[in-house]
């Protein structure tokens, strides 16, 4: 069994749990619904946006934790197509988070060979948000390590319907045969192409729903729910989730 990159000497919280993980069954793709930021803030008498800010800082921490055990893709659900319905001030604040995230974090992300990607509709984002994201994607596109994929302005039903519309156009243009449509072909029409499907979905803050997130891609994923709000979810909790994933995989393998 080959040791993880930072098994020894790591001072990160959770190193002990990380040491209990098996290095040959690390989930390739972990997706996270980072819920409970507003709730976390309200519990502390802080404005909701303080929770979003705290949540943003946690993205970097969990990215490094995932990178340390060899996760290849980490998708973070940052903003849904439904989130536009929130109060205008909150939406404006959220749209500025990518601008704040990158100047602060890009250096360490690059040093750790992380590639930034985005899944979602870029067109309706404010110019400054899109520019911040695009700069980060461009600056990290030659990196070969963990893919940090932000699901931003993303919704799964809309994704599938747009995919089907294109599929039907291609069929009408005789580029494809309806009989040839299978899982692999349909996946190519989704925004997540060419990423692999998530092996593990983590949702924080106690809600037991998928909420229009990667409905097709999560068909066979292990689902992990925790009561903790996203800003409280540490490296140790992340490794607990991976440990549970490995426990389930072993049980399944034993059948
Ligand atoms: C957002 C912080 C995390 C908790 C969930 C909601 C609030 C990081 C980003 C981000 C997105 C793209 C990018 C770089 C950073 C972000 C939004 C919200 C809209 F390229 N956190 N975070 N974007 N939250």
Image: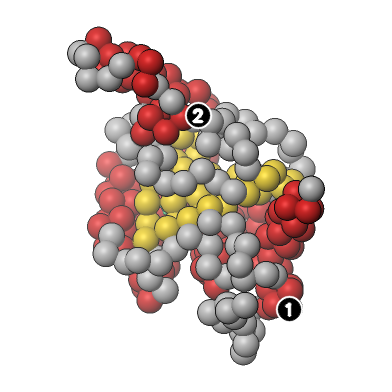
Dot 1 or dot 2: first in sequence order is: 1
State the separation of the CA atoms marked 1 and 2. 36 Å
- Where is the N terminus found, in terms of image quarters? bottom right
Q: Nearer the viewer, residue 100 or 115?
A: 115
Task: Name the disc covering residue 16, or none.
Answer: 1
Q: Which residue is mark 2?
A: 156
Does any portion of residue 56 appear in the rendered image? no
The percent coordinates of residue 137 (x first, y second) are 30, 55
Does any portion of residue 249 appear in the rendered image? yes
Ligand 1 under 8 Å from disc 1 Cβ: no
Residue at x 53%, y 68% (from the top left corner): 70
The percent coordinates of residue 118 (x first, y second) are 38, 46
- Residue ranking furthest to the front: 255
Question: Which element is circle 2 on?
Answer: helix
Local crowd size for mark 1, using a 10 Å CA cut-off: few (<14), some (14–19), many (≥20): some
Specify the quadrant of the image occupied by residue 4: bottom right
Determine contact: label 1, label 2, CB under 8 Å: no
């Amino acid at each position: 069994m080959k040791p993880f990159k930072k098994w020894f000497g790591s001072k990160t919280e959770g190193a002990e749990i990380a040491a209990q993980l098996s290095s040959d069954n690390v989930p390739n793709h972990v997706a996270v619904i980072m819920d409970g930021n507003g709730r976390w803030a309200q519990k502390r008498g802080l404005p909701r946006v303080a929770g979003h800010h705290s949540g943003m800082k946690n993205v970097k921490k969990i990215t490094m934790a995932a990178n340390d055990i060899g996760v290849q893709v980490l998708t973070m659900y940052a903003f849904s197509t439904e989130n536009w319905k929130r109060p205008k001030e909150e939406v404006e604040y959220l749209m500025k988070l990518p601008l704040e995230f990158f100047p602060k974090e890009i250096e360490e992300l690059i040093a750790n060979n992380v590639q930034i990607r985005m899944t979602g509709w870029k067109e309706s984002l404010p110019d400054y948000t899109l520019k911040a994201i695009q700069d980060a994607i461009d600056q990290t596109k030659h990196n070969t390590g963990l893919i940090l994929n932000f699901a931003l302005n993303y919704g799964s039903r809309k994704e599938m319907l747009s995919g089907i519309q294109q599929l039907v156009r291609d069929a009408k243009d005789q580029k494809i045969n309806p009989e040839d449509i299978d899982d692999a072909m349909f996946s190519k029409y989704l925004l997540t192409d060419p990423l692999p499907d998530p092996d593990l979905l983590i949702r924080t803050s106690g809600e037991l729903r998928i909420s229009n997130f990667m409905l097709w891609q999560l068909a066979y994923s292990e689902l992990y729910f925790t009561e903790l709000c996203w800003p409280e979810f540490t490296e140790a909790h992340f490794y607990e989730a991976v440990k549970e994933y490995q426990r389930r995989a072993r049980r399944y393998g034993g059948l």
